[in-house]
Image: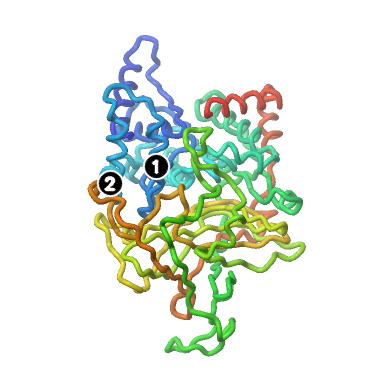
Amino acid sequence: MWASDRNDSEDLGDWIVQQEWSNGKIMTFGASADGIASLQTIKSKPKWLQGQYIAWMTSQIYQILLPYGTYKQKTAEDWLLDLTLSGDSNAIYDNIDIVHENEAHTDYWLGVEVSDNEFSYINFPNAIWGGWYDLFLLGTLQAFDGYNLKSDLSVRYTSKIIIDPCGHCLEAQNYFLSHSILGRTALVLAQMFEVYGIRPVKRSSVKNVTFYVMSSNDSAGLKAGGYWTSLSTFPKVKYTDYYLLSDQILSTKPMYDNIDENNQQLSSSSSSSSSSSSSFLYNPLNPVPTIGGNNLPDSIGGSIPCGPLDHSSIDNRDDILKFQSDIISEGDEIVITGTMTATLYVSSTAIDTDFMIKISDVYPSGEVRIIQDNAIRMRWRENGLEPTYMLNNTIYKVELNLWNTSYVFAEGHAIRITITSSNYPRFSINNNNGILLSDTKNYPGPIIKATNTLYHSLRYQSKITLPIILNKRIQLPEVRVIYEVQSMYPFLTDERLEKYSMMIGARKK
């Protein structure tokens, strides 16, 4: 899994430039797993490397396969088992064993990730392509930061990025019908022409940071979002806390507005009868099913449906805590673009368990469509090389990156946050017993039911933090990207773009 790709690319490149037909200059393209491989090329600082275009990949593989130690078993093993490897027939299973043996963020993962020092080797044109519902989204954005902000001074701040709604999740295109596929095809072709030195893009409305602003696919959402924007940099945002209060309330006002110097309540913004915590029973034998999100679908080597699917069908489960905002008033909207985070105060009766958090858009029709999610396996909450188990009913503070998005919550809609302890098969089931993946004699071990608790009190204020855009019209202006690209390249007609987009989809499938 990429450990030898640095040497392989160096050997191949050195061989190419020695051939009589070579001009000594090489540029690369890589997508998905081959995009991760492309990242390894820079590590040997080859003089022949003159440009890179990289799509749908990650520079930090551990937090994709094991975010906060929570194993994405189905994604990892579906992909590995689908590979055709020459030589040793046990190689695939050896790779699965490697993943299990490196459940912590060990040197193995560091060896295939890209360090800040290695990003400094980049001194050539480059561009990156990602997707909001792509399984590698976070690592793609981190790679862009490396190429754009940590590269050699000669090319710093010149990197380009396009983020479409889908990435690997081709099925999601059905929810984003306003030029999402043709738009990304046009932009990618134009960026490639520039990176590979074929023809520079004439800078008009298309700038270095181009992405799709998503919204719901009902009439309100189609008015509010569903368009491309293009900026010099990602927009500045106002990070705003939304508190998970009792009575299933999500509010920008914390439970207690005023406290004295001894942290004693002076006045309350919620009823005095409100509970300071919410608990549920997590039974590993009855996990919450995965419905959508940033997964690897079966059309591209995985097996988990992806995208903004409706999970209202699991609303009535008693092992899910729900917190919902007020309905957005007519004429209003809530616009977010950037990194979302969560701060949770939790406890459990078990020595180990998982906590899952989702952010969703609640439609007036009752649909609940997922925007983003993440999870933490509590034994790895300290990000060490050895597990740290929980003490019974001890309260722990955990902070999670909920990845990124660009989304408009339209009028009549609401924001929902859900907390639970399973999301299967997106994440492997935690049996709450603390047994490690590498413990082949004992894993998965006995099944232990756990009472898990989320706190929302004066002292323990669980919350999510959203990147709010204050003026969408100015900060996220609509750009007609197909028109802009076609004005630069008239031969890229709608018919040609349709053909190329179908070719891209067919190759990925």
User: Mark 2 is on which residue type?
Assistant: Asn
Q: Quadrant of residue 220?
A: bottom right
At horizontal 41% and vertical 23% (from top left) the residue drawn is: 26
Determine which residue is flagged by label 1: 59
At horizontal 28% and vertical 46% (from top left) the residue drawn is: 102
Front in this rendered view, residue 402 or 419: 419
User: Mark 1 is on which residue type?
Assistant: Ser
Q: Position of residue 366 (x, y in %)?
A: 68, 58
Taking the image as shown, residue 273 lies to the left or right of residue 452, namely right
Front in this rendered view, residue 400 or 291: 291
Q: Residues within 10 Å of mark 2 (few under 14, many from 20)?
A: some
Determine which residue is flagged by label 2: 102
Q: CA distance from mark 2 to mark 1?
A: 17 Å
Taking the image as shown, residue 60 lies to the left or right of residue 405, namely left
Q: Nearer the viewer, mark 2 or mark 1?
A: 2
Q: Quadrant of residue 37?
A: top left
Q: Position of residue 178 (x, y in %)?
A: 70, 40
Taking the image as shown, residue 63 lies to the left or right of residue 266, namely left
Q: Quadrant of the N terminus?
A: top left
Q: Position of residue 426 (x, y in %)?
A: 46, 48
Taking the image as shown, residue 198 lies to the left or right of residue 400, namely right
Regarding residue 158, the answer to whether it shows in the image is no
At horizontal 44% and vertical 88% (from top left) the residue drawn is: 261
Q: Position of residue 466 (x, y in %)?
A: 55, 61
Front in this rendered view, residue 277 or 195: 277
